[in-house]
Amino acid sequence: MGGVGAGPGMMAGAGPGMVGAGPGMVGVGPGGMGTMPMGIQVSPALPPHLLQLEKFVLLTDEGPVAVRARFNGTVGYLKRQVANQLHISPRLALTVTASSSTIPLNDDAIISPYAEGQGAERLLLSAAPRPLSDFFPGSPSLPAFRQIRVRPLVRGVPQNFSAVVTGVSESTTIRDLQAQLTKQQTLLPTVTGKDPASLALYFSPVFITPDVLLGRKSKQVLKGVQTMGSCQLIDDDILYLATD
C-alpha cells in the first residue's frame, strides 16, 4: 500500500494504493493546418479565499492530511478539493469512508459532520489507480477534455501549488501551452525571461506519481510539436514544469 503521493512504482492500472484544481476555444488555422490558441487561460488552481474554508482532516495509511472545503459541501466536492490541494492525478479513483464504517460514503453525502472541531469521527481517504480502459477514447467514464494542471518544479522538486489551464483541446500543441505559460510571470515566476521552447514539460499516462515520473523524466519530456491528444492527456491531468 502506498501513502500520500503514492509509493514508488505506482502506475495507472496497477494495484490499490493510498493517496499521495474558463471557457475558451482552440481554433484551427487556415486550411486546417495547425492550431491557434484563441482562448487558453492560465489561473491559480486554488481559490484566494482557501484559508477561510473549513478544515477537514482525513486519515491515510501514512498519516493524516488536511484540506480546506466548504462546510456544507458534499463528498464529491471534497474529493475535488483533495485532488486539487494534494495534487492528485485524475487517473486515481478516490474513496472517502467514515472511520466508523467500512462502506464508502456516496458522493452526495454532506461532509459538515466531519469538519475539524465538529466531532470525534474522522474520514478515511484512499486511492486506487483506475483501470486503463477508463481512458480509452469513447469510454463513458472519460470526461470531456477541458483543462489540465501545471505544477512547477524548482531544482527538480515539485512545488506545493499549481496552475490550471483551461480553453485547451486535444488539438492544442505543447508549443501553444509553452507560449501561454511564459506570459504568466506573476503566477509562475520561474518562467520570467525564458524562451517558450526552453520550458520542459513532463508527463506520462502510465507513471502518474511525481517520484516515479520524475525519476524517468529524460524519457517523459514532451515535444513542442506534440498535441495534447497525441500525449494521451485526459481532463485535469498534471504536467510538471521545469525551467532550470
Image (cartoon, rainbow, N blue to C red):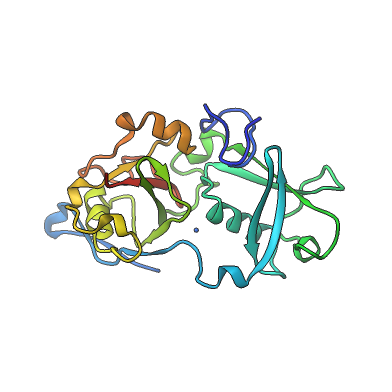
Residue 237 visible at all: yes
**Is 189 on the left-hand or right-hand side of 62?**
left
Q: Residue at x 25, y 53 (%)?
A: 178
Comparing 124 with 119, the one in front is 119
Q: Residue at x 33, y 33 (%)?
A: 220
Q: Quadrant of residue 127?
A: top right
**Is 104 on the left-hand or right-hand side of 160?**
right
Comparing 195 with 174, the one in front is 195
Q: Number of labelled discs?
A: 0
Residue 107 visible at all: no
**Is 93 on the left-hand or right-hand side of 231?**
right
Measuring from the top left, give residue 90's x and y in whole percent. Answer: 52, 46
Residue that extends furthest to the front in the rendered view of this protein: 155
Q: Quadrant of residue 156?
A: top left
**As drawn, 3 above or below 143:** above
Measuring from the top left, give residue 162's x and y in whole percent. Answer: 43, 56
Q: Residue at x 21, y 44 (%)?
A: 224
Where does the C terminus fall, quadrant-wise? Answer: top left
**As drawn, 71 above or below 99:** below
Measuring from the top left, give residue 154's x and y in whole percent. Answer: 36, 46
Q: Residue at x 51, y 30 (%)?
A: 11
Measuring from the top left, give residue 237's x and y in whole percent. Answer: 44, 47
Comparing 122 with 133, the one in front is 122
Where does the N terminus fall, quadrant-wise? Answer: top right
